[in-house]
Amino acid sequence: DAMVIQNPRYQVTQFGKPVTLSCSQTLNHNVMYWYQQKSSQAPKLLFHYYDKDFNNEADTPDNFQSRRPNTSFCFLDIRSPGLGDAAMYLCATSQERGRRGYEQYFGPGTRLTVT
Amino acid sequence: AQKVTQAQTEISVVEKEDVTLDCVYETRDTTYYLFWYKQPPSGELVFLIRRNSFDEQNEISGRYSWNFQKSTSSFNFTITASQVVDSAVYFCALGELYNNNDMRFGAGTRLTVKP
């Protein structure tokens, strides 16, 4: 089945220790998104890639970076995690950008704990 | 700016009851898209429906139905004969044609269906 895969499902990192979360997709979609979701809140868009074109949200901290080496894979790098970065991180894909009305398909998420 | 309001934070019903989840949106665009997503306890957001602003037809899919009314800027979601498996957080989201920031989610409504 075509899908969005996130690894690992649970990640524990230490305060200030860089961490990378990964996402892969078999849908061959052009767009890949990263969201941060804290407890009892809506997902918050961090950035997205439209093909190789990186689009950062204005309020995304510099501590968060992303890489998309090819169509299938996208990575979220947190350079120096703080306690406030503990959250669920959701990867999503869509065939085209949302402005054209395409729905997004989400992976199961990675729950990040910062100790 | 686009905005999505889900006024109901939590709803609790008993199995087999009907339940309606409210969604009110604000946008200055004439072309936009509305979405509903389900987030079960496992964490993965599941796409349920997309509706564009030019299509006010209501839709029914099994026990699910959606009522889109542009006059009141609402896109409500009804579950008929609710089941325990319907327990989840439900998000309404809005995407605008000319907004490159894709979807904006409402705060979500947590639905608990008790046996």
Image: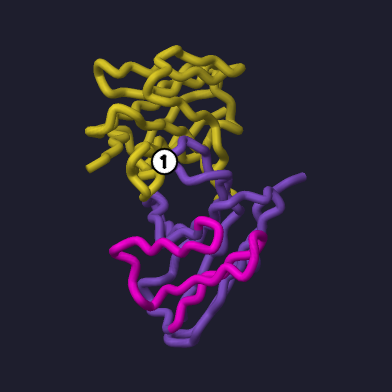
Chain colours: A purple, B yellow
Q: Position of residue A100 (x, y in %)?
A: 46, 37
Residue occupying the point 45% across, 82% down: A79
Label 1: which residue?
A: A99
> In terms of image quadrants, where is residue B30?
top left
Residue occupying the point 36% across, 31% down: B32
User: Furthest residue to the right?
Assistant: A1
Residue occupying the point 31% across, 23% down: B74
- Magenta region: A50-79
Q: Name the chain letter of the residue that bears numbered label 1.
A: A
The image shows a total of numbered marks equal to 1
* Local secondary structure at mark 1: helix
Specify whether A41 is left or right of A53. left
> In terms of image quadrants, where is residue A15?
bottom left
> In terms of image quadrants, where is residue B70?
top left
Q: Position of residue B23 (x, y in %)?
A: 34, 29
Q: Which quadrant is home to the N terminus of chain A?
A: top right
Specify whether B96 is left or right of B114. left
Specify whether A36 is left or right of B98. right
In the image, residue A78 lies in the stretch drawn in magenta: yes
Q: Is residue B105 visible?
A: yes
Q: Position of residue B114 (x, y in %)?
A: 52, 30
In the image, residue A115 lies in the stretch drawn in magenta: no
Seen from the viewer's position, the closer of residues A102 and B94 is A102
